[in-house]
């Protein structure tokens, strides 16, 4: 095997071994009883990989355009481009579906190992040197603090970790005037894999290319030509990725607006602390690259063996990038001009890569003289001294750093000695790599344990999910009606994980119209409106054709319910088809009451809304609501800003409604006050609001007493109680069934419905009117769908014959993306043909000269 292959294999081996050792040390899945599914890993990424498994095995309800499982019908391609277009993602198909957590873990390890291998490859392309040092530094990069602390549970970000050294290789090819077509294809692949981190990786690779041009001694004209080649290669690659990237871009335009965050730089002491092993802190830049690599990088400014210009340029590059992380304008530039929610230092992997490259640049020239190692050690002491003032330092940090530094110093001094024997050097290499792996395993274990202590977590696939999926499979009757996975969710994307066709949906692409429409109907959400929850309500079940609802016991993994247990129960309901007809005339508008909003969309009065005394609750202080309702009606409590439980007193059996709002969060005014399809909730909780809850049945006395047990407090205003007349709801359901579609066919991203003769008004599809739907009735030409209170609607002309309505969905941005991608492909083919002609001409000329 060639040295470059040995280096890549060593880097991959170091990475995989240290990562698994760290996870085993922390006793997290799959090496122990602790789950690794924290935050979005459990809520988003594992469920999306499960849905990809279904797609690849032909078991999904939709196609690449429409996901019929989530949000009552959502656009899938933006989600695929955001979470699942990595070349590693299809590996899930090789695992059993009930081992989806293991599949995601294996993909995570594979991505990290690939990042280490590609970095080792890059280092030996940048400069010749010892293959085992390149392999060790490749492992240092793949096991950097950003990778093990921030990206290990955001697996799509790891494609950016691979992208940075790959794009740096593309820059090297541009400098040498080689492989323009392959370079464009590499750019396309990394931008398709994850455009978010690819953007950051492209900036980092561009900065390294500029540094290489400044170091280069070639004429200015040749350097400008190389820069032009790199720019053309990058533009062609991004153009090829346009069908995915532009769909994602337009998806963000139609997504529910996230929270505006103002960047605030962390103290420099925290920045210094995150350079050291065994530290952790959400929201600070994770810059650890193990102490040996850091010490080598610190030798660069003092290493006289490195040409002065290279020392100056690379040192200034590392310093400038570090400072740019802490300054507002450059921070915005790194993050595509939008401060992200959560960690504001998602570009930290670029700086980790530059530190590793600086270390390699110094070592590959040879550590000349006695100054570099002592000087670097002195700087490292200053780093530790500054970091000691940070709250992110732990008792094990300095011992780990000292052991690593001492090993690195001894190893470098031995290797710098001219008469060092090969066996001694080999022993030093083994020792250095062992200490490096120990540091990285310890840092991984610390990140695992502290992440679990500070974040929400979710159980891996087990008996609960298997029981849910089995119950859904038995009840499923799609597309005749929907099967709701249920209000007691296991994760925020239950429909993707266990099946069914529900309201639940959590994504960066959650549509604005879905979130606002369900909120108007009494729905709840978390994650500032982008994690829409299931709504357990008879009226909305009729509106969205939910014919079967799975009710599961509370998840025993969650801390608020340590007992749990029990099997899921399926309740069936008579509902109309997916396509119903509403009368002609002006379309009503949503108002302030969720009960009246449901009635407007239903087309019938089914609620009695009694007057109640408004209640402001405090944590731990019980309160009561009293009212009068018709006998036999079903009280529904709609208190979006209340957190706690509510129980109907004297009801048998007792029904307890659990409300999860966050009234203590900072409040802000509605960002879109002109929207007509959302009720006025007053100041909106930033994080989450509670869904409407059923509370049982009113007894013969007609007296309703609701006992509130708040856990955070909140408010229950007048108009929060609605008493549902089930008889009237039944009549409204029969009317919608009689006037609605006689036959509905769903195929991939299209819906076709046959309506009875003389149907007029609006055909309403029980799907949120997200951008991309085009519909036609009868022989009319397709046009963008209308909206009927947030749902897809098609105006109908009065006809004595049955009318066929057809709706098709195409993700916004796909057409223009295809045009840009096609144009880039044509240019690339022309470039390939031209390069082939030049190569043949060169070979012909060489043969002619040889014959002469």
Image (spheres, rainbow, N blue to C red):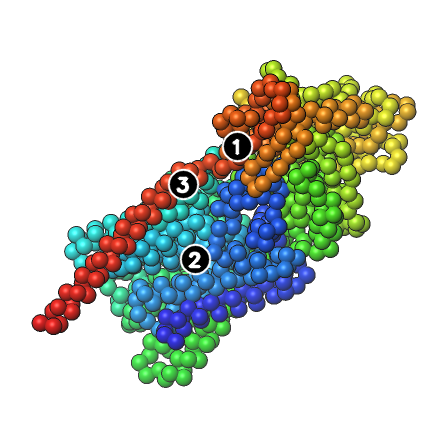
Rounded to the nearest whole Å, what is the CA distance between mark 3 and mark 2? 25 Å
Image quarter in which the N terminus is found? bottom left
Element under label 2? helix
**Residue 691, how many percent across, how many down?**
69, 33
Instruction: In the rendered structure, find residue 681 and report the number of the disc placed on it.
Output: none
Mark 3 — residue? 817
Horizontal side of residue 16 vs 565, given as left or right: left
Q: Residue at x 70, y 56 (%)?
A: 462
Instruction: In the rendered structure, find residue 773 and report the number of the disc placed on it.
Output: 1
Tell which of 168 and 741 is nearer to you: 741
Determine contact: label 1, label 3, CB under 8 Å: no
Q: Label 2: few (<14), some or many (≥20) within 10 Å? A: many
Image quadrant in which you'd find residue 134 = bottom left
Query: Does the image show residue 749?
Result: yes
Mark in front: 2 vs 1: 1
Mark 2 — residue? 162
Query: Does the image show residue 580?
Result: no
Q: Earlier in the sequence, mark 1 or mark 3?
A: 1
Rounded to the nearest whole Å, what is the CA distance between mark 2 and mark 1? 36 Å
Tell which of 113 and 761 is nearer to you: 761
**Residue 628, how many percent across, how many down?**
83, 21
Image quarter in which the C terminus is found? bottom left
Q: Residue at x 34, y 67 (%)?
A: 124
Element under label 3? helix
Mark in front: 3 vs 2: 3
Q: Earlier in the sequence, mark 3 or mark 2?
A: 2
Q: Earlier in the sequence, mark 2 or mark 1?
A: 2
């Amino acid at each position: 095997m060639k040295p470059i292959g040995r280096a890549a294999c060593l880097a991959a081996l170091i990475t995989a071994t240290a990562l698994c050792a760290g996870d085993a040390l922390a006793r997290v899945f799959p090496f122990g009883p602790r789950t690794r599914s924290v935050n979005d890993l459990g809520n988003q990424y594992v469920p999306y990989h499960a849905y990809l498994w279904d797609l690849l095995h032909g078991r999904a309800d939709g196609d690449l355009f429409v996901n019929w499982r989530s949000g009552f019908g959502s656009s899938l391609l933006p989600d695929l481009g955001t979470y699942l277009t990595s070349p590693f993602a299809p590996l899930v198909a090789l695992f059993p579906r009930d081992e989806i957590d293991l599949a995601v873990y294996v993909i995570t390890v594979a991505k990290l190992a690939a990042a280490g291998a590609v970095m080792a490859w890059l280092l030996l392309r940048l400069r010749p040197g010892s293959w085992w040092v390149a392999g060790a530094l490749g492992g240092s990069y793949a096991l950097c603090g950003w990778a093990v602390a921030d990206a290990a549970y955001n697996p799509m970000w790891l494609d950016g970790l691979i992208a940075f050294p790959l794009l740096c290789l593309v820059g090297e090819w541009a400098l040498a005037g080689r492989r323009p077509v392959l370079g464009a294809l590499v750019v396309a692949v990394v931008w398709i894999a994850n455009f978010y981190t690819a953007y950051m990786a492209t900036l980092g690779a561009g900065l390294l290319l500029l540094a290489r041009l400044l170091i280069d001694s070639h004429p200015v004209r040749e350097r400008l030509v190389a820069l032009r080649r790199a720019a053309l290669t990058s533009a062609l690659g991004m153009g090829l990725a346009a069908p995915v990237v532009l769909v994602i871009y337009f998806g963000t335009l139609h997504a529910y607006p996230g929270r505006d965050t103002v960047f605030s730089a962390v103290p420099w002491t925290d920045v210094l602390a995150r350079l050291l092993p065994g530290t952790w802190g959400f929201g600070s830049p994770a810059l650890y690259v193990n102490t040996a690599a850091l010490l080598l990088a610190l030798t660069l400014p003092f290493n006289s063996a490195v040409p002065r210009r290279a020392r100056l340029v690379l040192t200034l590059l590392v310093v400038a990038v570090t400072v740019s992380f802490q300054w507002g304008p450059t921070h915005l530039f790194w993050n595509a001009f939008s401060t992200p929610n959560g960690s504001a230092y998602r570009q930290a992997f670029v700086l980790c890569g530059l530190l590793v490259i600086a270390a390699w640049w110094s070592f590959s020239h040879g550590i000349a003289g006695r100054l570099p190692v002592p000087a670097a050690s002195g700087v490292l002491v200053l780093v530790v001294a500054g970091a000691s003032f940070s709250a992110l330092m732990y008792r094990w940090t300095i011992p780990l750093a000292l052991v690593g530094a001492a090993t690195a110093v001894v190893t470098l001094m031995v290797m710098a000695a001219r008469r060092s024997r090969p066996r001694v050097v080999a022993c030093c290499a083994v020792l250095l790599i062992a200490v490096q792996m120990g540091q990285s395993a310890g840092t991984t274990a610390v990140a695992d344990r502290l992440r679990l202590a500070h974040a929400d977590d979710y159980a891996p696939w087990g008996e609960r999910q298997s029981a849910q999926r089995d119950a859904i499979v038995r009840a499923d009757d799609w597309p005749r009606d929907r099967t709701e996975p249920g209000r007691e969710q296991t994760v925020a994307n239950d429909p993707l994980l266990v099946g069914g066709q529900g309201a639940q949906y959590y994504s960066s692409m959650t549509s604005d119209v879905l979130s606002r429409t369900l909120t108007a109907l009494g729905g709840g959400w978390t994650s500032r409106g982008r994690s829409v929850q299931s709504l357990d309500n008879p009226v909305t079940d009729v509106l969205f054709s939910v014919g079967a609802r799975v009710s599961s016991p509370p998840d025993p993994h969650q801390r608020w319910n340590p007992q749990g247990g029990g099997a899921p129960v399926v309740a069936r309901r008579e509902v109309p088809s997916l396509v119903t007809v509403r009368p002609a005339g002006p379309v009503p508008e949503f108002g302030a009451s969720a009960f009246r909003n449901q009635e407007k969309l239903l087309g019938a009065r089914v609620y009695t809304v009694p007057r109640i005394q408004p209640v402001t609750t405090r944590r731990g202080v019980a309160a009561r609501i009293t009212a009068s309702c018709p006998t036999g009606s079903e009280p529904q409590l709609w208190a979006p800003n209340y957190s706690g439980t509510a129980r109907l007193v004297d009801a048998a059996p007792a029904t307890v409604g659990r409300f999860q709002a966050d009234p203590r969060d900072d409040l802000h005014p509605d960002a879109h006050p002109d929207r007509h399809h959302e009720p006025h909730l007053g100041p909106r909780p930033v994080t989450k609001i509670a869904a409407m809850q059923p509370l049982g049945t009113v007894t013969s006395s007609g007296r309703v007493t609701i006992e509130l047990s708040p856990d955070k407090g909140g408010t229950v205003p007048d108009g929060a109680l609605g008493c549902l007349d089930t008889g009237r709801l039944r009549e409204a359901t029969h009317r919608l069934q009689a006037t609605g579609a006689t036959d509905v066919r769903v195929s991939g991203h299209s819906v076709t419905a046959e309506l009875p003769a003389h149907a007029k008004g609006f055909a309403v599809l029980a799907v949120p009117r997200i951008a991309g739907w085009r519909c036609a009735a009868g022989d009319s030409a397709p046009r963008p769908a209308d909206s009927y209170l947030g749902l897809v609607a098609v105006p109908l002309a009065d006809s004595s014959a049955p009318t066929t309505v057809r709706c098709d969905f195409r993700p916004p941005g796909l057409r223009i993306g295809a045009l840009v991608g096609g144009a880039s492909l044509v240019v690339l083919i022309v470039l390939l043909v031209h390069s082939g002609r030049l190569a043949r001409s060169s070979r012909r000329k060489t043969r002619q000269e040889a014959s002469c």
